[in-house]
Every structure is written in structure tokens, then in C-alpha cells.
Amino acid sequence: MTIRHPSCFSKEEKRCQKTTGGIALPIIMWATNKDKSSIIDQHGKNILNWMISFYIYVSISAILILLIIGIFALITLCLVAVIFAIIGAIKANNKEIFNYPLSITFIK
């Protein structure tokens, strides 16, 4: 069984991800598949924790745009999100757990 990271979606799934803000699809995938494997459950929790943390960081950066610092923070967050998605996809494919750095644990 191959575990797919949310960054490895098809074109249709990416289109859906863009329209739902990128958080609905991983929640649905995790909720429907978490009972199949403890690895899937842990990946889902890690991804959701990172996504919630990411949205918090983006919100703070948006406020800090008034101080110019927010622009650099948003650019850095976007780069970090892409890098984390690539690393997470590689780790998921190797059946390894990737704990996202900078992620606040909301779901244990």
C-alpha cells in the first residue's frame, strides 16, 4: 500500500484543493482512512497540525504587512510550505513519519 501525501494529488484533486482552501481534502482523507493504519492516522494528524499552524502564521504575517516584515514572512512561509510538502511526500512514500517543524500540536 502506498501512502500519498496531499501534495501528490492529480489535477482534479488540486483544483478541488484550491477551491476549498486546501484544508478540506486532507481532513476528509484522514477521517476516512485513519482506521486503516496507524501510519495514515499519524500522517493525517501531522498534516492537519501543520496546516492549522500555517494558517495562523499566515494570519499573523498578514497583520505584520503593515510593518513591512509581513511581506518577508509570507514569502518565507510559502517557500517553507512547498519544502515541507516535498519532504512530507518523500517520507510518506518511504512509510516514515514526518513531524513538521514549526507545527503546533492541536490534534494528538
Image (spheres, grey):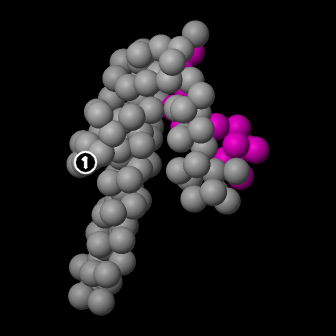
Instruction: Please indicate whether residue 70 sits to the left or right of residue 2 in the image.
Output: left
Q: Nearer the viewer, residue 13 or 30?
A: 30
Which quarter of the figure has residue 70? bottom left
Residue drawn at x 41%, y 50% is: 51
What are the residue bounds of the magenta stretch?
A: 2-15
Instruction: Count the numbered circles shown.
Output: 1
Residue drawn at x 38%, y 53% is: 52
Image coordinates of residue 28 in percent, x first then y, are: 59, 38
Answer few, some or many: residues within 10 Å of disc 1's Cα (few below 14, many 20 plus, some between 14 and 19).
some
Res. 3 in view: yes
Which quarter of the figure has residue 92? top left
Verify whether residue 10 appears in magenta: yes
Image coordinates of residue 103 in percent, x first then y, are: 27, 46
Residue drawn at x 53%, y 50% is: 23
* Residue indicated by mark 1: 104
Q: Nearer the viewer, residue 4 or 71?
A: 4
Residue extending furthest toward the bottom: 66
Image coordinates of residue 40 in percent, x first then y, are: 47, 22
Image coordinates of residue 60 in percent, x first then y, are: 29, 72
Secondary structure at numbered mark 1: loop
Verify whether residue 35 appears in magenta: no
Q: In which quarter of the image is the N terminus?
A: top right
Which quarter of the figure has residue 71? bottom left
Amino acid of disc 1: Ile
Residue extending furthest toward the right: 12
The relative height of residue 67 versus residue 36 in the rendered view (above or below) is below
